[in-house]
Image (spheres, rainbow, N blue to C red):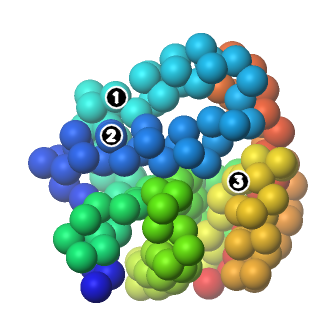
Amino acid sequence: MVKIIVAKNTDAKLLALLSRQTYIESHGHFIADKNDLKAYTKKTFSVSKTEEDISNTKNLFYIVYVNDLPVGYAKLILNTSNKNIASQNNCRLERIYILSDFIPLKIGQQLLTFVVEKAKALQFDTIWLSVYIKNNRAIRFYEKNEFINVGELNFLVNGKVYENIVFSKKI
């Protein structure tokens, strides 16, 4: 059974571990210098940084469980702008990750649908995200879900630039 819950401060350790593991699984092979990957994940997905992120009222975290096992999560940032997004009433899906063993179960689709519905309930009219240009599986996933390529932005991993596509969707 799939269950999605809102993450609380008490979930910070679990969320930090899920974040680190899913990021490494989904992006680790794109980052040539593994020391850069290690430094980035240590800084970005530490327990203290995760606690700080959960405490920020602009951030909503959702954890997805399968049979009571945490297998992924999403992070939605409320009211955040991007030069490629015309709407001023938007939110950003900054992260949506599923542990690789559970990707074949289509849980990512369920989590994305859930997050889009939450954004709609919060009365946003647009949701946007960015995805690494070489992450073809993710690009296909977002295109299948009617996200439109509206531009690009650079993403830094330990000071190195990775070009990302900005996708947007009216909701």
Residue that badge 2 annotates: 16
Are discs 1 and 2 less than 8 Å apart at CB? yes
Mark in front: 2 vs 3: 2
Label 1 and label 3: CA atoms lie apart by 22 Å
Which quadrant of the figure has residue 46? top left
Q: In this view, does 113 lie to the left or right of 60?
A: right
SS assignment at label 3: strand
Question: Residue 22: x, y in percent?
Answer: 48, 48
Q: In which quarter of the image is the C terminus?
A: bottom right
Pick the front one: 93 or 12: 12
User: Of callouts 1 and 2, which one flags the residue occurring earlier in the amino acid sequence?
Assistant: 2
Residue that badge 3 annotates: 130
User: Of callouts 1 and 3, which one flags the residue occurring earlier in the amino acid sequence?
Assistant: 1
Label 2 and label 3: CA atoms lie apart by 21 Å
Residue that badge 1 annotates: 46
Label 1 and label 2: CA atoms lie apart by 6 Å
SS assignment at label 2: helix
